[in-house]
Image: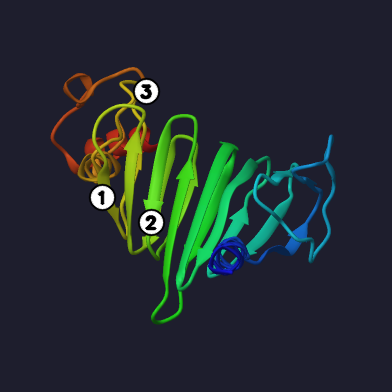
Amino acid sequence: MRKLLFITIFIATGFYAFAQDAFIDELTGTVGIKQPKDESFRTANKGDKLFKDTIIQTSFRSIAIIKIGSTTLTVRPITTLSLTEIQKLEETETLNINLQAGRVRVDVKPPAGAKAHATFTSPSSVASVRGTSFEFDINTLYVNEGAVSYIGNKGQSILIRAGESSHVEWTGQVSNPLDEKRANLMPPNLIGTSAKDTPVFGSTGTNLILVIGLGFN
């Protein structure tokens, strides 16, 4: 009797752990889905249920908005991703996404008293969050709100905060967000020249304006 009770509790707990609601909330253009037991993709429709190991694929000029518990995924055009884990245990949501190609916007906003752990893996990097908003593709990350732990195939993870961006460098490490900001603040040089090679035709205001104009063209 005790053994039967234990098995019943175990089954009920396991069901509750994987009963996370996931579906396509909105879509435009052509979106394909491949369910775990399907042999090929089919055209997705609004309201389609999604499960563990479901693959979503958007075409050119196509977008899909996916709701998974307290997480909203905006799947950009020409993107392929799979849901490798969708789990809810008590008040904790766990979501793992494998981004194979393209770009997604992620909004993780768990209700008060709940937790959401989301991990997004690409061929070159991993982004992990606990409630935030960011844009992610296979090589770059931009954080809109909160903070994201970002790591490449090599090196250590870096915390990227709101308003910061990072990318995977050729070394397999992710770039420092401070370096990204400095790079964005640097003025462009003339094509084919470095800053020290930039020609200066004199010290008058007219000549200086001419040089700056060439730099921006």
Density class for disc 1 (Cα within 10 Å; few <14, some 14-19, many ≥20) is some
| Residue 16 percent location from the top left of the image | 59, 68
Q: CA distance from mark 2 to mark 1?
A: 10 Å
Q: Amino acid at mark 2?
A: Val
Q: Residue at x 81, y 48 (%)?
A: 30
Q: Residue at x 26, y 38 (%)?
A: 183
From this view, report whether residue 54 is shown above or below residue 207.
Answer: below
Q: Which mark is residue 129?
A: 2
Q: Residue at x 53, y 55 (%)?
A: 105
From this view, report whether residue 36 is shown above or below residue 124.
Answer: below
Residue 176 relative to residue 65: left or right: left
Q: Where, quadrant-wise, is the N terminus in this rendering?
A: bottom right
Q: Amino acid at mark 1?
A: Leu
> Which residue is disc 1 drawn over?
159
Density class for disc 2 (Cα within 10 Å; few <14, some 14-19, many ≥20) is many
From this view, report whether residue 6 is shown above or below residue 80.
Answer: below
Q: Is residue 217 visible?
A: no
Q: Secondary structure at mark 1?
A: strand
Q: Where, quadrant-wise, is the C terminus in this rendering?
A: top left
| Residue 57 percent location from the top left of the image | 72, 43
Task: Judge by depth and name the residue closer to the eye, 160 or 94.
Answer: 94
Q: Secondary structure at mark 2?
A: strand
Whichever of labels 2 and 3 marks the residue nearer the N terminus, that label is 2
Residue 11 relative to residue 134: left or right: right
> Which residue is disc 3 drawn over?
191
Q: CA distance from mark 2 to mark 3?
A: 40 Å
The number of numbered discs placed on residues in the rendered structure image is 3
Q: Quadrant of residue 150?
A: top left
Whether the residues at callouts 3 and 1 have beta carbons within 8 Å, the answer is no
